[in-house]
Structure formats: C-alpha cells, structure tokens
Amino acid sequence: MIFLQNIEKSYVTGHQSLHVLKGINLRIGEGELVSVMGPSGSGKSTLLNILGLLDGFDSGTYRLAGNPMHKLSEKQGAYYRNQFIGFVFQSFNLLPFKSATENVALPLYYQKISRKKRNMMAEELLERVGLRDWATHLPSELSGGQKQRVAIARALITKPKVILADEPTGALDSKTSEEVMEIFKEVNGKGMTVVIVTHENQVAAETKRIIRLNDGIIVKDEVPQSIVP
Ligand code: ADP
Ligand code: MG
C-alpha cells in the first residue's frame, strides 16, 4: 500500500535548512496496523504529512497503492488524498459552528454528493463510532474523546484505503484513548491500513508493528512485545 525509498526532506527557513528526514525506507502492506514512535522533533509528523500528501518531499520515491507521488500538482494531490487517505489530528480540527453530522459529512461536500445522502452517511458513521445520540451537537458540547470519534468518522466517510493519525490520543486520558484505539482496531479489522503516530507505549502496544524514528531515520522496526508469541 505504502512504499518509501530513500525519502529525504528538509525545511528551509531564511538562510537555514533543517534536514528532517534523512533517507526513509519503508513498506507498509495493505491491512497493516502500524505505530510510529520517536522523540519529539524526530520527524514523525513530517513523515505522516508526506504519507498523507499534506506535504511534499525533496527526493526519493513514494508510491501509494502503486502510484508515484512525486511532485504532484495541487489537483493531483487532492485527488489522491480524496481517493486514498483519511487523516486524524491530535487537535481534532473540527469546524466549531457545525454539528457532528455536518463535520463528518464535510469531505463528501467536495465530492458533490447531495446533502441528504451526505447526512445519511454521516449519521451511519456516527452510529458506528458510538455517537448516534450526539449527531446534532456542536464540538464544544462534546468531550475530547467524543470529538476525536467525530474526527475519525469524518476520516472514514470517504472510505479511504489508509488512515493516518498523528498523536490521536495525545489530548485524551487513558480510558478515552483506549476507546479511540478500539475504533482504529475495528476499522483495521475490516482491512483498512492504519498508521498511528504516538509517544504512548500503551497505544503502540495495541498495534501490530512499531516503527521507531530517531533524528530522521528509522532505527527500529519491530513487533510489540505484547504480541510476540
Ligand atoms: P515530531 O512530529 O517527531 O515531533 P516534526 O516532524 O514535527 O517532529 O518536526 C521535525 C523537525 O522539523 C523539528 O525540528 C521541527 O521544528 C521542524 N519542522 C517541522 N515542521 C516545520 C516547518 N513547517 N518548517 C520548519 N521546520 C519545521
Ligand atoms: Mg509531531
């Protein structure tokens, strides 16, 4: 599903250039449930943003479901994002003055699907993440865990092949984190590829593979102890 070869990325600000990803080689197959760990500043978000086509890279090869992702135009990037990617952020990124249903339905607006159909699909997804009774509520009326479940429903509504989540439980307590992880595991159980950036061992231990990043390189790629037979 995801194939990276020698991916390099620097950020240039003024006269300074910061080499963030220093040759990332990685293959993630369809249906995997993977976590990415590493110290703050090691390049986890940069890597996830590249995978999610939210940011470009300088050199190397990225193939998503076999399609080369190098130097995409805005339009191509939007197309592949829509087609393949669901992104979940630590800070939820919900629209504050829209209901849970409207937030979840939003990606379909850009696909020119009728309001009636959009809302119907959104309500189905809210039900799936356990929020049927919260459909008409605004984000400010929801707990952190509920907001993240709305954000996951929004990521799922386009039926992506890959879910990418950047510290999705970073703002949640451990019980709520567990509920959010249950949803990712359920979604993965249906065959979706899931990649989760986290610094919590508890979260990583629930995935089937842990990729450890340090200073822009992958230093370890392992199966969590919890599932070693
Ligand atoms: P992590 O998610 O592992 O904490 P990031 O990928 O966010 O790390 O950041 C890696 C490094 O790149 C950090 O030193 C950060 O300050 C820098 N960085 C991230 N985004 C940008 C940007 N848009 N412009 C300049 N530097 C950035
Ligand atoms: Mg980060």
Image (cartoon, rainbow, N blue to C red):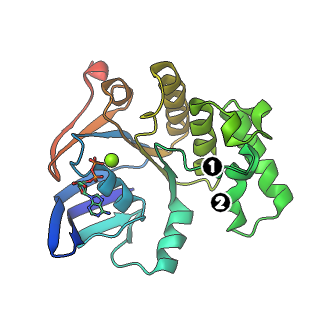
Q: Measure how far apart labels 2 and 1 are at the Cα level.
A: 7 Å
Tag 2: residue type?
Answer: Pro
Q: Position of residue 11 (x, y in %)?
A: 23, 67
Tag 1 secondary structure? helix
Marking on residue 154: 1
Q: Position of residue 90 (x, y in %)?
A: 46, 42
Judge whether residue 9 can be spotted in this image.
yes
The answer to which of 105 and 226 lies nearer the viewer is 105
Label 2 Cα neighbours within 10 Å, binned few <14 / some 14-19 / many ≥20: some
Decide: is 130 above or below 1. above
According to the picture, the residue beneath numbered tag 2 turns out to be 107
Earlier in the chain: of badge 2 and badge 1, it is 2
The answer to which of 200 and 112 lies nearer the viewer is 200
Q: Position of residue 157 (x, y in %)?
A: 65, 51
Q: Position of residue 7 (x, y in %)?
A: 22, 64
Decide: is 54 above or below 141. below
59 displayed left or right of 170: left
The residue drawn where x is 86% and y is 57% is 116
5 displayed left or right of 109: left
The residue drawn where x is 75% and y is 46% is 99
